[in-house]
Image (cartoon, helix red, strand yellow):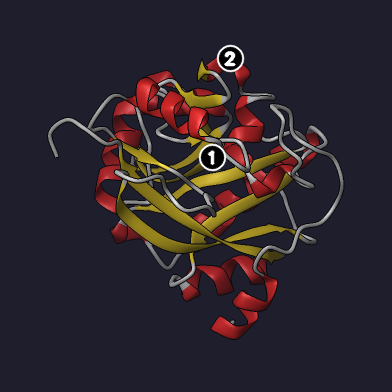
Amino acid sequence: MSGTGLEALNGVAGGGGSLGGGSSLVHPLDNPAYAALNGPHARFAERRGRVVRYQLDVSPWLGLPEAPEPGDWADLAALAGAGAEVPLPGVRVALPAGWEVTFDMEGVQLVDDGVDAAPDPEAVRLGAEDVPEMLDLVARTQPGPFLPRTVELGTYLGIRRGGALVAMAGERLRPPGWTEISAVCTDPAYRGEGLASRLVLAVAFGIRSRGETPFLHTSARNTGAIRLYETLGFRLRRTTRFVSARVPGGAA
């Protein structure tokens, strides 16, 4: 898909509903971490004022109101600590003075638009006892953040060969009515066999089975992944940004 096409869909939202915390968003996917932490994932939340973040061994993501005020930035600084680097996914406002951007990447958000979801006979449910292997697979494939308790966010499925975990995918953010598919990865020795696609469809099946809709994120530069997800039945909903910034003060 061309860059022009992505830009044309930037900010496009569908559906109704609104978020709590004083937000006037028209759709929970416009600020999914904030929506999840104020909804189905509230049990994982640490809060200060209107700022929420996941417990640090669960996920690095945090949520700010759609239009953060100076007090919200002060609460985030107090929650994270001086000099800390914090992710600010989807933030579309200028950072206050003294905040240093440390990472900035354009991403895309795709949603289920007729995914042929189905269980996979080879997929196994992964749990706490599998975390060491999951962390090892993530370290070798780099699909994105995965921490010791990330597995608690939802269902994670894997495929084993010779007893070894060679592919996995699972659930991360869970705004009301939606669940993000994340940590999609395959051992390099087993790529090209369609394992990741099978697991995405199996995870999507579980999400659909409880009456929710799958969605996912990837880098806007990862055109191969975007094409693959589109062939599976996902459609581009919007572009977004993955930004990290350093809290003022403290050691760099």
| Residue labelled with disc 2 | 43
Judging depth in this view, the residue of 43 and 76 nearest the camera is 76
User: Which residue does the image show at 51% across and 45% down from the upper left?
Assistant: 182
Q: Quadrant of residue 50?
A: top right
User: Which residue does the image show at 66% across and 40% down from the upper left?
Assistant: 179
Query: Could you tell whether 250 is left or right of 125 in the image?
Result: left
Residue type at numbered disc 1? Gly
Q: Secondary structure at mark 2?
A: helix
- In the image as oriented, which residue stretches furthest toward the top? 43
| Residue labelled with disc 1 | 170
Query: Could you tell whether 184 is left or right of 250 in the image?
Result: right
Q: Position of residue 61 (x, y in %)?
A: 46, 36
Please identify the quadrant where the N terminus is shown: bottom right
Instruction: Decide if residue 56 is in sight here.
Output: no
Please identify the quadrant where the C terminus is shown: top left
Rendered view: 91 above or below 1: above
Q: Position of residue 142 (x, y in %)?
A: 31, 51
Query: Could you tell whether 13 is left or right of 92 in the image?
Result: right
Q: Quadrant of residue 155?
A: top right
